[in-house]
Image: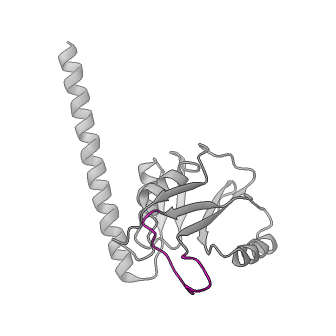
Amino acid sequence: MAHSGHLVFWLSGDITIQAKTLQMFSQMAPQLSFCNFPLIWVKSDNVGIMPDPKREPRRIYEAALIASREDRPLVKPVSNAISSSTNKEHHPHTKPEPVLKHFLQMFVDNNTRMLDPTCGGGSSLRAAEALGAAHVLGLEINDEYVGNARRALQQFRILRKASTLQKEQASEQDTTTDL
């Protein structure tokens, strides 16, 4: 991790697991300062795990913890919760790009160098690039998901480049019309 930066990672909504995770980080990386409130994605399509329908509710939210190193300020504060439907197009556990863009706008600017060590379908990479990240790197162990992530990121870059060219051409036409 950079000398100064943010760490965001998704984990179980189980508060026991969250507490153990925080305890582990306090021992292994005491330089990290964790936010007391997690980021929450509520799955608006009601998709979730129902481990014991007679004793527990359906789990339709996912949580992420946030930490900073050296009191790194936010780029832009936003709410810590968002509602959005699931999307399993590129990976079975994909976080939707609108969700990631919402949360990542707190941390990503044109100086950002982002690493996603479990990038799955690459939605975090696309979201960070859409927000102007200088560099993104995703790691994924499953070859099928690596291929999905590469194709989706390549398609995203092609569409973004085409959109940029259209905007430039429209701007040039406006300038010519004004003369």
Camera sees residue 135:
no
Residue 101 within the segment the image draws in magenta: no
- Residue drawn at x 19%, y 25% is 173
Magenta part, dominant SS:
loop
- Residue drawn at x 41%, y 50% is 130
Q: Vertically, is 52 above or below 112?
A: below
Relative to residue 29, is residue 96 drawn left or right? left
Camera sees residue 24:
yes
Residue 106 point in image, percent of width and height: 58, 48
What count of labels does the image hold? 0
On-image quarter of the C terminus: top left
Question: Considering depth in this image, is 108 or 83 the residue closer to the camera?
Answer: 83
Residue 52 within the segment the image draws in magenta: yes
Residue 108 point in image, percent of width and height: 54, 50
Question: Considering depth in this image, is 169 or 44 the residue closer to the camera?
Answer: 44
- Residue drawn at x 23%, y 39% is 166
Relative to residue 85, is residue 177 drawn left or right? left
Question: Considering depth in this image, is 161 or 55 the residue closer to the camera?
Answer: 55
- Residue drawn at x 62%, y 75% is 12
Residue 118 point in image, percent of width and height: 51, 74
On-image quarter of the N terminus: bottom right
Q: Residue furthest top?
A: 179
Can you tell which quarter of the image residue 89 is in? bottom left
Question: Considering depth in this image, is 29 or 67 the residue closer to the camera?
Answer: 67
Relative to residue 77, is residue 110 drawn left or right? left
Q: Vertically, is 118 above or below 173?
A: below
The residue stretch that appears in magenta = 44-58
